[in-house]
């Protein structure tokens, strides 16, 4: 490597370290590795999975997602109330720190816990270990202490059935716009206002329309996390703890709602755009010099438009693949499967891709920012305290300074994306086998969707490796 190249690498890593310290959401690094080899290998792995599934008998495919019962759980109706109250108290403490603590988002607990511990880590834990959100959502406990039943009876409001989870879709898009387009979503006071306002808004909705109804249909994070929990290999069914291939829980109660299907597609589209809108390619599209980024406030309209276009584009592409698959599978057959049924059921197959990219996209941010979270926790008001006894603790970004550790990080990210797509292909094929009950028809229905997933593997791996300028 020439001296100029070495200087360039050093400068890029130095700049990244500065960005990581000043930003509590994700940041990428320029990957100085032979990515063509890894990307090609990932795409081939997904393609081989498709081919293997094509030759397996349908009864083997449907048996893949059969769960195994482990043990019974004792009934407990009140424990979650207390854990939820503890979660609310913790949130209240974070809000106090947000309003009164240091203004630097890398020193304030609120943005670090919201964007790093909860949004990055907790979502991954939910998909891995099951419905943890049931125990720690910060509304359920408070709701049980209020005269909610009398309030509902006096007002008599009820959410119409046809609304599905469309309110949650809208709220999630608004949240995503705040996270991606707002000039300072990690500003402690700004974030404290938004979080406290949303908590109050949600509690009011629960009081007016019923706690369970509002959380399950309008509270976007409960909808999101409930779906992620169904992806977990570990799950409960009628007080039985069971284990199986990730996604087995989706077959006990398949997705049959268009609004939930749209929510899952929105989740994947926004997750993909979150990575795309930082690339040099996106900045070139919107006419911004990536080496002289003017700041988020200068591209609010472009980010908003890009996010909405991404959602529309992904929904359209997925719907087209499903329509072509249904057309191919239904030809010259009396027993037909409708487009709506196929669209809603198969939308669940995108969940592994969504969580895999969530993990891969935020991995480097988590590795840096969880350290800041520890430092902020030991000294919440930045007045010299050391509540955790850490002593003089320095946040390290040294793992970004050597090719070997950077390579390990990227290989971990790439492996997560590939595994997520492989699981999605298996899940989609298992769903199709149950829908069409015929191997040949299931295969025909999956051809367009398989091509879609292979392309998305390529896109996901490219996004991980693409240079970023925002």
Image (cartoon, rainbow, N blue to C red):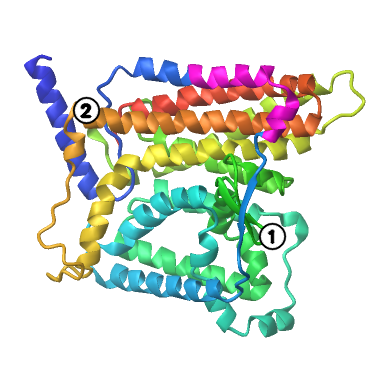
Q: In the displayed structure, does residue 412 sit left or right of residue 214?
A: left
Name the secondary structure under disc 2: helix
x and y percent of residue 320 in the render? 68, 26
Figure quadrant of residue 378 = bottom left
Residues shaded magenta: 44-63
Cα separation between marks 2 and 1: 47 Å
x and y percent of residue 54 in the render? 67, 18
Q: In the displayed structure, does residue 118 sit left or right of residue 217?
A: left
| Depth order, front residue of 16/71 | 71
Q: Residue furthest front?
A: 71
Look at the image and say whether residue 50 sits in the magenta stretch.
Answer: yes
Residue at 55% from the left image edge and 63% from the top image edge: 134
Quadrant housing the C terminus: top left
Figure quadrant of residue 217 = bottom right
Name the secondary structure under disc 1: loop
Quadrant housing the N terminus: top left
Q: In the displayed structure, does residue 294 sit left or right of residue 385?
A: right
Q: Nearer the viewer, mark 2 or mark 1?
A: 1
| Depth order, front residue of 403/262 | 403
Q: Which residue is mark 2?
A: 404
x and y percent of residue 15 in the render? 17, 36
Look at the image and say whether residue 243 sits in the magenta stretch.
Answer: no
x and y percent of residue 323 in the render? 74, 27
Dot 2 surroundings within 10 Å: few (below 14), some, or many (20 or more)? few
Residue at 77% from the left image edge and 26% from the top image edge: 326
Which mark, by number, is residue 247? none
Residue 102 sits above or below residue 260 on the image: below
Residue at 50% from the left image edge and 20% from the top image edge: 45
Residue 40 sits above or below residue 61 on the image: above
Which mark, by number, is residue 238? 1
């Amino acid at each position: 490597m020439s001296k100029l190249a070495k200087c360039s690498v050093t400068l890029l890593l130095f700049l990244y370290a500065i960005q990581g310290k000043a930003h509590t959401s994700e940041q990428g690094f320029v990957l100085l590795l032979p990515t063509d080899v890894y990307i090609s290998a990932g795409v081939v792995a997904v393609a081989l999975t498709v081919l293997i599934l094509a030759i397996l008998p349908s009864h083997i495919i449907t048996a893949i997602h059969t769960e195994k019962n482990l043990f019974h759980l004792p009934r407990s109706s009140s424990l979650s109330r207390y854990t939820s109250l503890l979660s609310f108290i913790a949130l209240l403490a974070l809000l106090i720190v947000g309003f009164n603590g240091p203004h630097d988002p890398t020193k304030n607990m609120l943005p670090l816990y919201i964007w790093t511990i909860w949004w990055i880590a907790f979502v991954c834990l939910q998909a891995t270990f099951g419905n943890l959100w049931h125990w720690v959502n910060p509304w359920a406990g408070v709701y049980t202490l209020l005269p909610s039943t009398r309030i509902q009876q006096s007002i008599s409001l009820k959410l119409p059935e046809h609304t599905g989870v469309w309110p949650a879709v809208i709220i999630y898009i608004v949240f995503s716009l705040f996270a991606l387009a707002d000039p300072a979503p990690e500003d402690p006071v700004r974030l404290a206002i938004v979080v406290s306002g949303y908590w109050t808004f949600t509690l009011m909705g629960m009081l007016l329309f019923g706690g369970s109804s509002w959380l399950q249909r309008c509270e976007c994070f409960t909808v999101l996390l409930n779906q992620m929990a169904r992806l977990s290999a570990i799950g409960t069914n009628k007080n039985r703890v069971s284990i199986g291939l990730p996604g087995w829980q989706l077959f006990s109660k398949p997705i049959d709602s268009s609004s939930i299907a749209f929510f899952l597609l929105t989740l994947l589209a926004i997750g993909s755009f979150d990575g795309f809108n930082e690339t040099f390619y996106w900045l070139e599209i919107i006419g911004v010099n990536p080496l002289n980024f003017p700041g988020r406030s200068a591209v609010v309209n472009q980010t908003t438009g890009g996010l909405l276009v991404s959602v529309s584009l992904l929904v359209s592409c997925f719907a087209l693949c499903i329509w072509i698959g249904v057309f191919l599978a239904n030809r010259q057959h009396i027993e037909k499967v409708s487009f709506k049924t196929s669209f809603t059921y198969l939308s669940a197959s995108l969940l592994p891709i969504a969580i895999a990219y969530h993990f891969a996209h935020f991995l480097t941010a988590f590795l840096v920012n969880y350290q800041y979270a520890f430092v902020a926790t030991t000294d919440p008001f930045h007045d010299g305290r050391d509540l955790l006894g850490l002593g003089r603790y320095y946040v390290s970004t040294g793992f970004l300074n050597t090719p070997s550790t950077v390579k390990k990080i990227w290989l971990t990210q790439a492996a997560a994306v590939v595994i997520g797509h492989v699981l999605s292909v298996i899940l989609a094929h298992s769903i199709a086998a149950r829908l069409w009950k015929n191997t040949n028809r299931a295969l025909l229905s999956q051809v367009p969707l398989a091509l879609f997933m292979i392309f998305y593997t390529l896109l996901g791996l490219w996004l991980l490796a693409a240079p970023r300028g925002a």
